[in-house]
Image (cartoon, grey):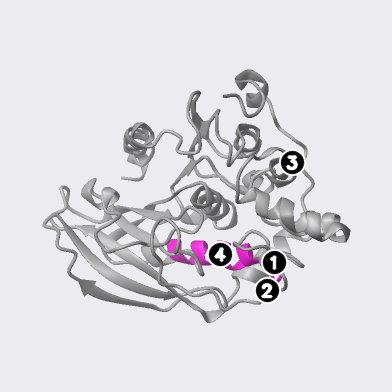
Amino acid sequence: MQVDWPLEQARAHHPDLPAPDDLARFWADTLDEEPVEVRTEPVDNGLLGVDSHDVTFTGHGGAPVRAWLHLPAAPLVSGRLPGVVQLQGYNGGRGLVHEHVFWATAGFAHLVVDTRGQGSGWTTGATADPGPSGPSQPGFLTRGIEAPETYYYRRAYADACRAVEVLRGHPAVDARRVVAAGASQGGALALAVAALVPDAVAAVLCDVPFLCDVRRAAAIAQSDPYLELVRYLAAHRDRVEQVFATLAYFDGAVLARLATAPALFSVAMMDQVCPPTTVFAAYNAYAGPKDIEVYEFNGHEGGEAFQRSRQLEWLATTLAPAL
């Protein structure tokens, strides 16, 4: 079922989205905080091939953020490990300790990071969100949307940047070979990391990303979370321009212009959650080396295991120059 423009027309979608005049200052001020403190404790995961640790680090505003760190029990190569920071889809959390260990089994240090306040949907989380918020739709997309300074994703993007710093600082990890990875909301977070701390990541895995070309997404998406925004604006008819002015600071198709690390995207042409044109808007704006896998007959699940195989192959080549 076609949900957006045909593929060739969607591929060419490159909207000229205005960036806020103070975008660089806003994010510099947001990320200029106290040093990150990290507490790590070993935990039994019941698995033979992976060693796991319960991690708590200082997130935005000093709030604690939880994560799992998984390491190969017997690394296949000597020396420090490449790393993957895994960022979660909407209302997912770090899950149970044995739940997300793929990248560790592939030889990476794997940091599975909570998204603050989330983790009560498809996987569990353990991180609260003490940030400010006015009236909002149920969910996270409109929380604090009255201004960029109070918006929920300011805190979430800053946490993701700090998570990369945490993994890069681990003694088992090669700081030159850390990857930001995620799908949907996780893709938005990975894209934000690539844009806001471009020197901290060696590569980006960005699957069917959320929060890109948001005004178009709100107009054509057929499913939540974007419909949270639609319902909010239907109620707050007088806030439309103010809301999209806030979202411009967080739109992946705006921030992608600042990203320089090699990136592998994916898009699904029957995606009712993150419409294909919005993914191409971010991909076409992305300033670094890039490639994209197109899944013509898939919805928001995208490539799943097929994309994971492609990512393994792509990372083997992309990270090789850093060896």
- Which residue type does callout 4 highlight? Ala
Q: Nearer the viewer, mark 1 or mark 2?
A: 1
In depth, the one of 9 and 14 nearer the eye is 9
- Which residue type does callout 3 highlight? Ala
Residue 248 visible, this orientation:
no
Residue 314 within the segment the image draws in magenta: no
What are the residue bounds of the magenta stretch?
Answer: 149-164
Q: Residue at x 34, y 72 (%)?
A: 55
Q: Quadrant of residue 172?
A: bottom left
Which residue is under mark 2? 133
3D distance between C-alphas at marks 1 and 4: 17 Å
Which residue is under mark 3? 219
- Find residue 136 and name its label: 1
Which label's residue is closer to the chain start, 1 or 4? 1
- Which residue type does callout 2 highlight? Ser
Residue 28 visible, this orientation:
yes
Q: Residue at x 78, y 61 (%)?
A: 22
Q: Is residue 73 left or right of residue 166?
A: left
